[in-house]
Image (cartoon, rainbow, N blue to C red):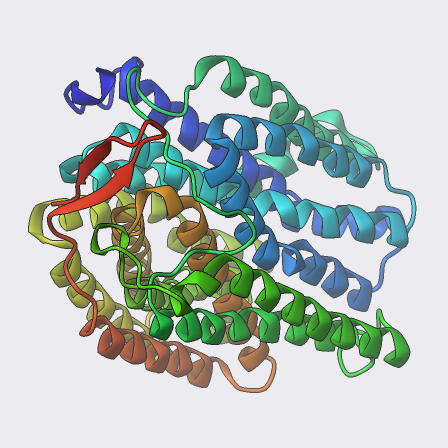
Amino acid sequence: MSITRSFNLFSFSGKMKILHLSWMAFFITFVVWFNFAPMLQAVAASLGLDKSQIKTLLILNVALTIPARVVIGMLTDRFGPKMVYSGLLALCSIPCFMFALADTFLQAAVARFALGFIGAGFVIGIRLVSEWFPANELGTAEGIYGGWGNFGSAAAAFTLPTIAVLFGGDDGWRYAIGITGLMSLLFSAVFYFNVSDTPKGSTYFKPKNVGAIEVTSKGDFFLLILMKVPMYAALALLTWKLSPAGVSMLSETIAMICYAGLVVLFVYDLTHVWKVNKNIFVEPVPEMHRYKFKQVVVLNILSFATFGSELAVISMLPLFFSDTFALTPVMAGMVASAYAFMNLMSRPGGGWLSDRFGRKSTLLILTAGLAIGYVVMGMVDSGWPLVMAVIAAMACSFFVQAGEGAVFAVVPLIKRRLTGQIAGMTGAYGNVGAVVYLTVLSFVDYSTFFYVIAGTAVVGFITLLFMEEPKGHITEVREDGSVELITVS
């Protein structure tokens, strides 16, 4: 089978073809998802937007991603990565075109809200890559997928303004953003006709139920419910930001309706959790099907601190350098880009370290480094040489992004048929972290902001002590009743 071939990064066949097409798909989703920020000033001038409306669009761009990652994870496990990734790329080109053609704030707002769904694409590739690579290469492969794909946000920042200038005129930004939608649409076909969910002869294991993640003990049932609360709390925070207490996009009445809707949705979600898992209260789950949900909890918390802090810091770092060192906006943006550039090597590096030196030990070292890195960032002030501040940011970003690579080196090793859903929840916690950190930033100074992130990293380090190193095999049952043992160590 293709899965047994050597790991040759310059190959474009077998499992390496799947890896390259996967990171390209993820790259395009991030180009589309982050195509607004580089065009912000041009869009504001063209549509006559004020600062409050710009902030609203930025919030709406990420609002849908938290639930979307959970939903996309479920769909991936049920229908397979090939179908779901192709469909996501094609469908999300529509709101991208809508945004490029928008003439009013309302049209732009609806389009940006819908585009939040494309931010869930990351989850799909985690499951796909795990189907094609053995455990001893999985961290490296997932790191390359995540790191190279994540670079799409930086690529958008560097290329889209140039494309807009090439087209020229007041509508240059429309062409630039429209091109990203066209990329997404065309690559959906490329992906569909060149990818298969598993190597030839392998089985794609699907969850027994769709609608909620399966757990295998009573304690894990209540732990799952507890872990859902922060996701809905983050959505409530986003609603608050859009309410009169924030940017005043929503009236007080509409905000209250949204809060009530979140409560109803939470209760509805809990009913699905009960329907999928009620049997565990009647009879114990056979030993071969059990997994420990505490593993997922630890990864969720680590994703909160790693990917959550990355999203938040990327959003504020240009302003931080501008305010701290009195740089021009252009220069501050260029300096801050060093943080994002680290993704190309840091995330694959974290996955590689995880493959070579163990999942838990690598995460412990990287999480400790992350905490120290943000403490150092909190100490940066105008008295520092600029070059030392940049070095501190790059060093911090290494631990952040390598930590992300190490986190998603573990995700596929918990329960194969649930990998999409686990990746969806863990990825969603990254977005929850971003919402929380950026909310904190609106109340405190830069130093306190960095110290808060460092504090959550310490919490992640403590919870990591309770994680168990993946070892042995995952047991899955084929449709014909035969058993397959999937090596995880």
For the question of whether residue 84 can be seen, the reply is: yes
Q: Taking 476 as reference, is 50 above or below it?
A: below
Residue at the (46%, 71%) spot, across then down: 227
Residue 170 is situated, as x and y percent measured from the top left of the image, at 84, 37
280 or 467: which is nearer to us?
Answer: 280
For the question of whether residue 381 can be seen, the reply is: no
Task: Name, please, the residue furthest toward the front.
Answer: 282
Q: Is residue 6 left or right of residue 268?
A: left
The quarter of the rendered structure image containing the C terminus is top left
The quarter of the displayed image where residue 14 is located: top left
Q: Is residue 322 left or right of residue 427?
A: right
Q: Taking 301 as reference, is 122 above or below it?
A: above
48 or 118: which is nearer to us?
Answer: 118
Residue 19 is situated, as x and y percent measured from the top left of the image, at 34, 27
Q: Taking 438 as reference, is 445 above or below it?
A: below
Task: Name, please, the residue furthest toward the left.
Answer: 357
Residue at the (88%, 54%) spot, across then down: 105
Residue 239 is situated, as x and y percent measured from the top left of the image, at 73, 72
Residue at the (61%, 42%) spot, across then down: 118
Residue 120 is situated, as x and y percent measured from the top left of the image, at 54, 46
Q: Taking 468 as reference, is 257 above or below it?
A: below
Report the number of discs. Answer: 0
The quarter of the displayed image where residue 137 is located: top left
453 or 232: which is nearer to us?
Answer: 232
Q: Is residue 351 left or right of residue 180?
A: left
The quarter of the rendered structure image containing the N terminus is top left
